[in-house]
Amino acid sequence: MMDISVPFDKKQPDSAGNIHNITIDVVRNRTELDMAFQLRQDIFVNEKKIPYEKEFDGNDFTSTHILAKCDKQPAGTLRIRCFKDFAKMERLCVHPQFRKHSIAKYLLDYTQFYLIQKGYTYFIGYILSSLKDFWCARGFQIDKSQPEVKVGAQTLLPCIYQFPPQRIAQHKAKINLLATESYAQKYQVRTNSPTE
């Protein structure tokens, strides 16, 4: 399937009425990867007390990393590992300064679009037990067939997120439209008939 890069760009007001520019895209260079790693160190290692050697592993070099920025500042990140039949979302975190900006929701929306584009219909992962209610309210289901995992002082719960069928249909329609527009731009082809 054609890989269509579609960065997320949204204007988001805060409670004081200030407008913030939120962007989300796949990490494409070392500077962005360093931003993602710094966020993970700040949140998981420093705030959540997860040991550094558990947070950063060899999978970081074979994963797709997604980075959210708010007004060009690193705000949130996650990584995705793609397997034959499923994808695994890992290491989602949002900087405390940006937790009231819906960054986690936007990261999830972007990740759905990205994975649907690649043919996936669900992903698995682990969530912090302290955030169980937050994630379950967003459609995550605890996978009771898998054991909980202890990492440092944290308990992680296995979960699955099935993409809603209407979301799959919406994203596939958008992907088809973008593929048509991308093809038209690349080959300078008209996508609608002339009015004459």
Image (spheres, rainbow, N blue to C red):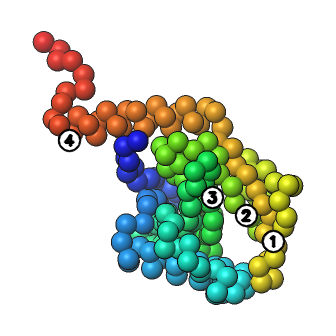
On the question of residue 23 being in view, the answer is no
Asked whether disc 4 touches disc 2, contact meaning CB atoms under 8 Å apart, the reply is no
Q: Which amino acid does the dot numbered 1 rest on?
A: Val
The answer to whether marks 1 and 4 mark residues whose Cβ atoms lie closer than 8 Å is no
Q: What residue did someone put label 3 on?
A: 88
Residue located beneath label 1 in the image: 149
Q: What residue type is labelled 4?
A: Lys
Instruction: Please name the residue that numbered disc 4 is placed on.
Output: 186
Q: SS at mark 4?
A: helix
Report helix, strand or loop for mark 1. Answer: strand
Rendering coords of residue 66 (x, y %): 49, 63
What is the x, y in percent for residue 168? 57, 36
Give me the C-alpha separation between circle 3 and circle 1. Answer: 16 Å
Q: Classify mark 2: residues with Cα within 10 Å, few (<14), some (14-19) or many (20+).
A: many
Q: Earlier in the sequence, mark 4 or mark 2?
A: 2
Q: Which of marks 1 and 4 is in front?
A: 1
The reply to whether residue 62 is in sight is yes
As helix, strand or loop, the secondary structure at mark 2 comes to strand
